[in-house]
């Protein structure tokens, strides 16, 4: 769901949440911030009623097509990575360090890393890129 939000400094912005309960939980934890000023005192703003129009439907169809195209591009990139890199699974951070520090041969790898591991790799100056992985569909 998209919500119109307003911070204590009267900046208004939109944000997407799974539902109202998800917004409330994140807001209580201070994890919803104004993109203009960073204020975490955020509330729902009054919203105009959602009236369906052909223009809105056309925009929704265009957005849906763009999402499908983005997923297709990500899937293509994922296949390139899978075909040309060594999968190291959850040992990604350890392997990336070994390659960076010359403890093992240089090669292209992919795998999983926790957020904490990614921060540590970044702080060590180890070059890597996080890629959103597209889950296969049954269709």
Image (cartoon, rainbow, N blue to C red):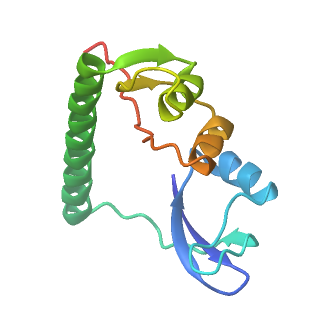
Residue 102's place in the image compared with 61, above or below, is above
Q: Please state if 43 lies on the left or on the right of 107 as rendered.
A: right
- The residue lying toward the viewer, choosing from 37 and 18, is 37
The residue positioned 41% from the left and 21% from the top of the image is: 105
- Residue 131, given in percent of the width and then of the height, sits at 40, 37
- Residue 98, given in percent of the width and then of the height, sits at 54, 26
Q: Please state if 105 lies on the left or on the right of 58 as rendered.
A: right
- Residue 59, given in percent of the width and then of the height, sits at 23, 59
Q: How many numbered marks does the figure carry?
A: 0
The residue positioned 45% from the left and 40% from the top of the image is: 130
- The residue lying toward the viewer, choosing from 104 and 66, is 104
- The residue lying toward the viewer, choosing from 48 and 17, is 17
Residue placed furthest toward the bottom = 9
Residue 95's place in the image compared with 97, above or below, is above
Residue 117's place in the image compared with 28, above or below, is above
The residue positioned 59% from the left and 41% from the top of the image is: 121
Q: Please state if 23 lies on the left or on the right of 1 as rendered.
A: right
Residue placed furthest toward the right = 28
Asked where in the image residue 31 lies, by quadrant, the reply is bottom right
- Residue 122, given in percent of the width and then of the height, sits at 57, 47
- Quadrant placement of the C terminus: top left
Asked where in the image residue 52 lies, by quadrant, the reply is bottom left
Residue placed furthest toward the front = 102
- The residue lying toward the viewer, choosing from 47 and 112, is 112
Residue 44's place in the image compared with 99, above or below, is below
């Amino acid at each position: 769901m998209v919500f119109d939000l307003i911070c204590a400094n009267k900046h208004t912005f939109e944000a997407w949440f799974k539902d109202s309960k998800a917004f409330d939980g994140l807001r209580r934890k201070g994890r919803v911030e104004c993109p203009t000023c960073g204020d975490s005192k955020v509330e729902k703003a009054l919203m105009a009623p959602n009236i369906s129009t052909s223009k809105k439907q056309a925009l929704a169809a265009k957005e849906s097509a763009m999402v499908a195209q983005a997923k297709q591009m990500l899937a293509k990139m994922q296949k390139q990575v899978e075909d040309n890199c060594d999968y190291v699974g959850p040992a990604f951070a350890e392997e990336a360090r070994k390659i960076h520090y010359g403890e093992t041969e240089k090669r292209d790898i992919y795998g999983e890393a926790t957020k904490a591991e990614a921060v540590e790799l970044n702080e060590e100056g180890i070059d890597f890129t996080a890629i959103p992985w597209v889950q296969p569909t049954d269709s």
